[in-house]
């Protein structure tokens, strides 16, 4: 057996072979795709919308820019970007075609169709040329990637010089008491909510566990720097329940 075959990664709290994780993640999002947007609203009480708006505020989209929204799912971030940047264009790239299908059904997709493309692709091996995009975003997706460092390297490759990376992801609350309260909610409410709404408890159990396995803010910022990005910084959202990370291809 080769070293590559021996490598493992985490799928929630389980260790699994690297070669199997992508298929398992694909299964999760294929299962929940039709109820994904509804569950985001229910789980967060709609706060995820404020987080995405805060992402756009910091990103400050400009006219004519080209966005690559990786793990872009049903298009939330791309829609926001295009509405703020006249003449801009966006590519939503996701490994799960069922998520892209749901995105195309949304009213915003029809209104923005001329500026928007939907592409099935892997964050670790993007099907795009180097130096192709002005902005790269990934929202609540990078923690599901098998090798996060490879995804960040790909982000750097496809961005033009002067391009910007922005990551929105669940993170760590720097207060033990509040983190414990959040954990109680996450583990005791979200999986059961997922079962009631989507009929799939296991997928939401994985999603909760995957948040806990993701690096803290400083550790993830260091990974972004290691991929070559400069001027790396982050902002906590809702006390650190989520965080925005920014970096530039200088």
Image (cartoon, rainbow, N blue to C red):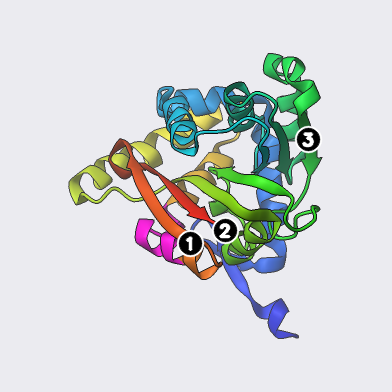
Distance between mark 1 and mark 2 Cα atoms: 6 Å
For mark 1, give the secondary structure.
strand
Secondary structure mostly taken by the magenta-highlighted segment of the chain = helix
| Magenta-tinted stretch | 212-222
The reply to whether discs 3 and 2 touch (Cβ–Cβ < 8 Å) is: no
Q: Residue at x 58, y 45 (%)?
A: 138
Instruction: Answer above or below: position of 234 versus 50.
Output: below
Q: Is residue 84 left or right of residue 26?
A: left
Sequence-wise, the earlier of marks 3 and 2 is 3
User: Is residue 108 rendered magenta in the image?
Assistant: no
Q: Which of the two residues, 200 or 144, is positioned nearer the viewer here?
A: 144
Q: Which residue is mark 2?
A: 249
Instruction: Answer above or below: position of 243 versus 126.
Output: above
Quadrant for residue 16, please give it. bottom right
Q: Is residue 19 left or right of residue 145?
A: right
The reply to whether discs 1 and 2 touch (Cβ–Cβ < 8 Å) is: yes
Q: Residue at x 77, y 49 (%)?
A: 121
């Amino acid at each position: 057996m080769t070293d590559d075959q021996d490598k493992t990664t985490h799928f929630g709290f389980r260790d699994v072979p690297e070669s199997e994780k992508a298929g398992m993640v694909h299964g999760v999002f294929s299962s929940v795709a039709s109820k994904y947007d509804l569950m985001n609203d229910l789980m967060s009480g709609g706060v995820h919308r404020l987080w995405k708006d805060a992402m756009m505020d910091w990103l400050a989209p400009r006219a004519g820019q080209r966005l690559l929204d990786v793990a872009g799912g049903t298009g939330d971030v791309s829609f926001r970007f295009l509405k703020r940047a006249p003449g801009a264009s966006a590519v939503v790239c996701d490994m799960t075609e069922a998520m892209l299908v749901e995105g195309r059904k949304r009213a915003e997709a029809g209104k923005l169709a001329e500026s928007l493309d939907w592409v099935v692709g892997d964050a670790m091996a993007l099907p795009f040329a180097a130096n192709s995009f002005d902005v790269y975003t990934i929202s609540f997706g990078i923690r599901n990637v098998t090798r996060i460092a490879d995804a960040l390297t790909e982000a750097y490759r496809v961005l033009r010089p002067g391009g910007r990376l922005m990551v929105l992801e669940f993170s760590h609350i720097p207060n033990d008491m509040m983190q414990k309260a959040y954990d109680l909610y996450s583990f005791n409410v979200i999986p059961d909510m997922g079962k009631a709404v989507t009929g799939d408890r296991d997928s939401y159990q994985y999603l909760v566990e995957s948040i806990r396995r993701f690096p803290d803010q400083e550790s993830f910022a260091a990974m972004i720097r290691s991929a070559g990005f400069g001027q790396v910084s982050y902002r906590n959202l809702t006390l650190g329940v989520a965080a925005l990370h920014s970096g530039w291809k200088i």
